[in-house]
């Protein structure tokens, strides 16, 4: 019995002495990559363009009025559908996107209208005064493409 206890004690001593050395030689797992600050951007094909068919720059309108979207070089797909060379429209009202905002999902609010169902026109009601309108094509996750597919801003007046 004494001999068995001495072997257990000795093996515990060996484990206690060898364990730190064994642990030091065991490679630790690689740290997980840090989450990306911005989602990956979907590429846009050369020559892709989005534009406002109606109204025209400088038009004087009465609310509500119809805005018709145009697109060349790409197709329209609803939000959530990841398919190359497609996207869906976002209408910017009295605002712009630039810099880091072009690498993030487009906000959804009164100045950033989403057409994630694949719509290509809308009825818009704006208060009297001058307003700017601009289209931006977003990918399946509402992030502008790279390079961005954006229309030239137009200015309208609502009377």
Image (spheres, grey):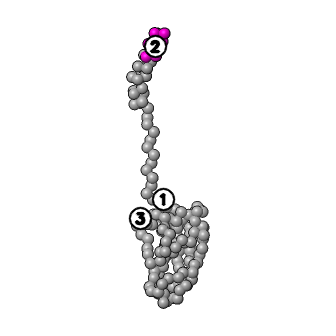
Distance from Cα at disc 2 to Cα at disc 3: 68 Å
Q: Which of 127 and 118 is in front in this view?
A: 127
Question: Pointer 3: residues within 10 angstroms few (<14), some, or many (20+)?
Answer: few
Q: Residue 99 carries which label?
A: none
Q: Does the magenta stretch include residue 3?
A: yes
For disc 2, the marked residue is 5
Count of numbered tags = 3
Could you tell me what secondary structure mostly forms the magenta stretch?
Answer: helix
Q: Distance between the residues labelled 2 and 1?
A: 61 Å
Residue 154 appears in the picture as rendered: yes
Write the residue at 45% across / 80% down. 132
Residue sitting at 49 percent across and 74 percent down?
110
* Secondary element type, mark 1: loop
Q: How crowded is mark 1: few (under 14 residues within 10 Å), some or many (20 or more)?
A: few
Identify the magenta region: 1-9
* Label 2, residues with CA under 10 Å away: few <14, some 14-19, many ≥20: few
Q: Where is residue 91 in the image (x, y as percent from the top left)?
A: 51, 75
- Whether 139 is among the magenta residues is no
Task: Please give the label number shown on residue 39.
Answer: 1
Among numbered discs 2 and 3, the one appearing first in the sequence: 2
Element type at mark 2: helix
Single out the mark in the foreground, 2 or 3. Answer: 2
- In percent of width and height, residue 65 lies at 55, 84
Left or right of 118 on screen, residue 21 = left
Q: Where is residue 56 in the image (x, y as percent from the top left)?
A: 51, 85
Image disc number at residue 100: 3
Q: Residue furthest top?
A: 2
Identify the mark nearer the N-term, 2 or 1: 2
- Give 105 or 70, whichever is nearer the viewer: 105
Estimate the x, y position of residue 19 in percent, counting from the top left: 42, 26
Q: In this view, does 130 lie above or below 21?
A: below
């Amino acid at each position: 019995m004494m001999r068995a206890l001495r072997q257990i004690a000795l093996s515990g001593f060996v484990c206690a002495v060898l364990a730190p050395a064994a642990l030091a030689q065991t490679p630790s797992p690689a740290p997980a990559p840090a989450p990306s600050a911005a989602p990956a951007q979907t590429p846009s094909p050369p020559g892709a363009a989005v534009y406002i068919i109606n109204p025209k720059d400088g038009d004087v309108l009465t609310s509500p009025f119809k805005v018709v979207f145009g697109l060349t070089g790409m197709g329209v797909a609803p939000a959530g559908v990841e398919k190359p060379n497609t996207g869906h429209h976002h209408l910017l009202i009295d605002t712009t996107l630039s810099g880091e905002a072009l690498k993030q999902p487009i906000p959804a609010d009164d100045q950033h209208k989403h057409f994630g169902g694949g719509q290509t026109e809308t009825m818009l009601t704006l208060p009297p005064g001058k307003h700017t309108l601009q289209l931006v094509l977003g990918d399946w996750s509402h992030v502008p493409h790279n390079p961005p597919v954006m229309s030239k801003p137009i200015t309208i007046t609502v009377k």
